[in-house]
């Protein structure tokens, strides 16, 4: 099977605990491209942003494994500019997918009861005097995350369900069953690798320490609560009138 992963610290840690034959099949892509590649290749599995399921209702997803965040450690951070008092717009940068675009709008409307305009910034470094949501590893460059607010933590606080950021998805139920078997026990290996600091090449010592000390926020082994979180996350865009129908999640 072929595997497509987003390019971030967390997916790279997962790749490094896979059996070697599987690890060699991992292809790293920007998050918004993965679902399209999986749709084109019936012999593939992608670790896709959860809300990409809205556009790919044919996909099955793993009920056992994915990337869920509970607290401060996550893949996306919000940077509020204290000079900007209104919350009419937010700029998105980094490895932005449908998940950040949709949830940023919903979250800010929930928090501030106002219609929010979401804007994509090709180069976030050029944006000044704005509120910013940054996705991916750019948060850990120059230790930006230290001045940010966890997007995952805000989602959990606002909606009271687990924030499952990425799910393993495929058009093949059989492939997902096979992957579930291969991944059994990998969750413990992830924590061991992070505890020994065998990860994050190129990260600063402060960033690695932060990830190690907060790794319990990173959930790989999904449970019933996470499956409920996926279902509720998928329903949010429908309940807010962003999409016209509810996506039925097909767990394997």
Image (spheres, helix red, strand yellow):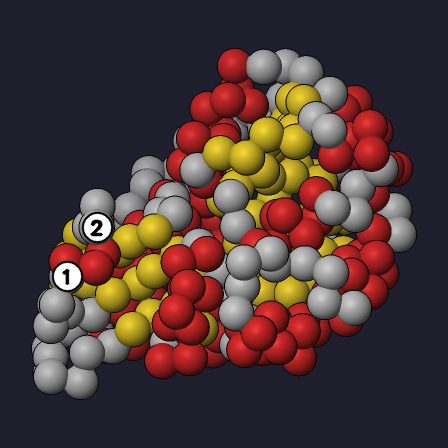
Residue 132, compared with residue 36, is above or below; it is below
Front residue (pair 211, 85): 211
Occupied quadrant, residue 41: top right
Q: Which residue is mark 2?
A: 123
Residue 148, compared with residue 56, is above or below; it is below
Query: Image check: 198 left or right of 141?
Result: right
Q: Which residue is mark 1?
A: 127
Occupied quadrant, residue 104: bottom left
Query: Image check: 239 left or right of 231?
Result: left
Which percent across, then down, holds residue 192? 82, 65
Query: Image check: 94 left or right of 90?
Result: right
Q: Quadrant of the C terminus?
A: top right
- Is residue 183 in view from this perspective? yes
- Is residue 176 in view from this perspective? no
What residue is drawn where x is 32% and y is 41%?
Answer: 243
Residues marked 1 and 2 touching at CB (< 8 Å):
yes
What residue is drawn where x is 25% and y is 65%?
Answer: 132
Occupied quadrant, residue 18: top right
Label annotation for residue 62: none
What residue is drawn where x is 83% and y is 51%?
Answer: 186
Which percent across, then down, holds residue 244? 33, 38
Q: Quadrant of the N terminus?
A: top right
SS at mark 2 in the image: loop
Residue 174, compared with residue 64, is above or below; it is above
Front residue (pair 221, 74): 74
SS at mark 1 in the image: loop
Which percent across, then down, holds residue 3? 65, 29
Front residue (pair 21, 171): 21
């Amino acid at each position: 099977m072929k595997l497509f992963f987003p390019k971030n610290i967390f997916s790279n840690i997962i790749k490094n605990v896979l059996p070697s034959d599987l690890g060699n099949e991992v292809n790293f892509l920007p998050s918004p491209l993965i679902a399209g590649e999986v749709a084109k290749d019936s012999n593939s599995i992608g670790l896709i942003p959860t809300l990409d399921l809205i556009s790919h209702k044919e996909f099955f997803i793993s009920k056992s494994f994915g990337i869920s965040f509970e607290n401060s450690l996550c893949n996306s951070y919000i940077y509020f500019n204290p000079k900007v008092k209104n919350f009419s717009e937010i700029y998105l940068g980094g490895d932005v997918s449908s998940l950040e675009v949709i949830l940023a709008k919903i979250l800010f409307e929930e928090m501030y009861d106002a219609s929010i305009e979401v804007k994509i910034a090709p180069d976030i470094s050029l944006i000044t005097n704005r509120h910013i949501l940054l996705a991916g590893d750019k948060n850990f460059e120059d230790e930006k995350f230290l001045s940010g607010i966890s997007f995952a933590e805000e989602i959990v606080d606002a909606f009271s369900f687990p924030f499952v950021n990425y799910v393993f998805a495929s058009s093949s139920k059989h492939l997902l069953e096979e992957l579930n078997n291969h991944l059994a026990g990998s969750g413990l290996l992830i924590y061991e690798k992070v505890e020994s600091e065998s990860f994050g090449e190129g990260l600063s010592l402060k960033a690695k320490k932060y990830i190690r000390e907060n790794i319990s926020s990173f959930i790989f082994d999904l449970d019933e609560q996470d499956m409920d979180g996926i279902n509720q996350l998928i329903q949010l865009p429908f309940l807010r009138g962003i999409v016209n129908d509810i996506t039925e999640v097909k767990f394997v």
